[in-house]
Image (cartoon, coloured by chain):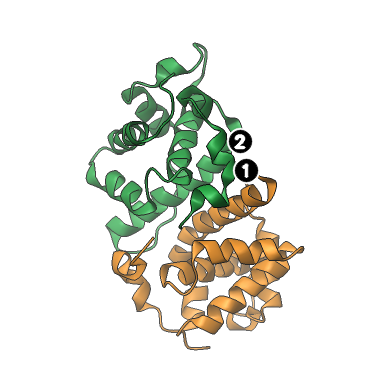
Chain colours: A green, B orange
Amino acid sequence: MENLKEYFPFIRKYSSLSEVLRDQELASLGDAFVNFIYSLTLSRTAGKPIGRKLDSYVLSSALRKAGMRALLPHRTDRHKQADAAEALIVYGWLSEVISLRETIDILMREEDLSEGVSILLKEIIKRSRLLRQ
Amino acid sequence: MENLKEYFPFIRKYSSLSEVLRDQELASLGDAFVNFIYSLTLSRTAGKPIGRKLDSYVLSSALRKAGMRALLPHRTDRHKQADAAEALIVYGWLSEVISLRETIDILMREEDLSEGVSILLKEIIKRSRLLRQ
């Protein structure tokens, strides 16, 4: 999809990483996005259509592996850590730093799914203009 | 996303509409796709990120409005009718007859959501090469 930033102008309002990670509305859209790309990844690998939800434990583990746990409040539970990962992943797509195709390719490359998601999160950070705070 | 048909070659195996409508695996991937595009549609309209599941009643009503109920077995329940709509919608995207952007634009255009989904289903049929049986 082209011109995502023009079509969804709200994505420009985020300036820092912690703002993205703590945004519950973005996490909610991110949940739909992540389940979609995970299903596409499984479908590509299996050579047939598959629909599945990505486990929130995998997402929270990936966030920790990517070293982003410290950006969330101390008492943030596992579920909210998974939300943070979902928010950042959809942020990456909407702000056009990573394409659908690249997202799927990254997830497919790793044997371990949480490792794949962790690499995806780090790649989005590396390419984005978000302040690292 | 470009070259979807090359990336997901399994989409070429479908030759008739009823084959698509009855495919439970395609419906499962379609569920993830439909929730994603519905969430994008709401986000575009509201000007902020929103994630929501599309109600299966809306989907089954849309399938009936589009005149496709007769292609399913007589006893097919509402839930399976919704599955059929989801299968056809993701078929439309994967077979490159309709883009993400067009899909969202169609859903946004109608006040009534099931009417919007019905128009989307009819548009996919019109453009696809599926046999009308």
- Callout 1 touching callout 2 (CB < 8 Å): yes
A112 and B41: which is toward the camera: B41
Name the outermost residue toward the top.
Answer: A74
Q: Which residue is mark 1?
A: B50
Query: Total label count?
Result: 2
Q: Is the residue B84 above or below the residue A88 in the image? A: below
On the rendered structure, is B50 left or right of A55?
Answer: right
Q: Residue B119's image quarter?
A: bottom right
Q: Is the residue A52 above or below the residue A18 in the image? A: below
On the rendered structure, is B21 left or right of B82?
Answer: left
**Residue at the image point whose x is 54% and y is 50% from the top:** A6
Question: Picture coordinates of residue A47 (x, y %)?
Answer: 29, 63
Secondary structure of the residue carrying numbered label 1: loop
Quarter of the N terminus of chain B within the rendering: bottom left
Hey, what amino acid is under mark 2? Glu
Q: CA distance from mark 1 to mark 2?
A: 6 Å
Subunit of label 1: B
Q: Is residue A27 visible?
A: no
Question: Picture coordinates of residue B52 (x, y %)?
Answer: 63, 47
Question: Picture coordinates of residue B7 (x, y %)?
Answer: 30, 64
**Residue at the image point whose x is 43% and y is 63% from the top:** B25
Q: Which residue is mark 2?
A: A25
Q: Is residue B105 visible?
A: yes
Q: Residue B58's image quarter?
A: bottom right
Mark 2 burial class by Cα count in 10 Å: few <14, some 14-19, many 20+: some
B65 and B81: which is toward the camera: B65
Question: Picture coordinates of residue B57 (x, y %)?
Answer: 70, 61
Subunit of label 2: A
Q: Residue B123's image quarter?
A: bottom right
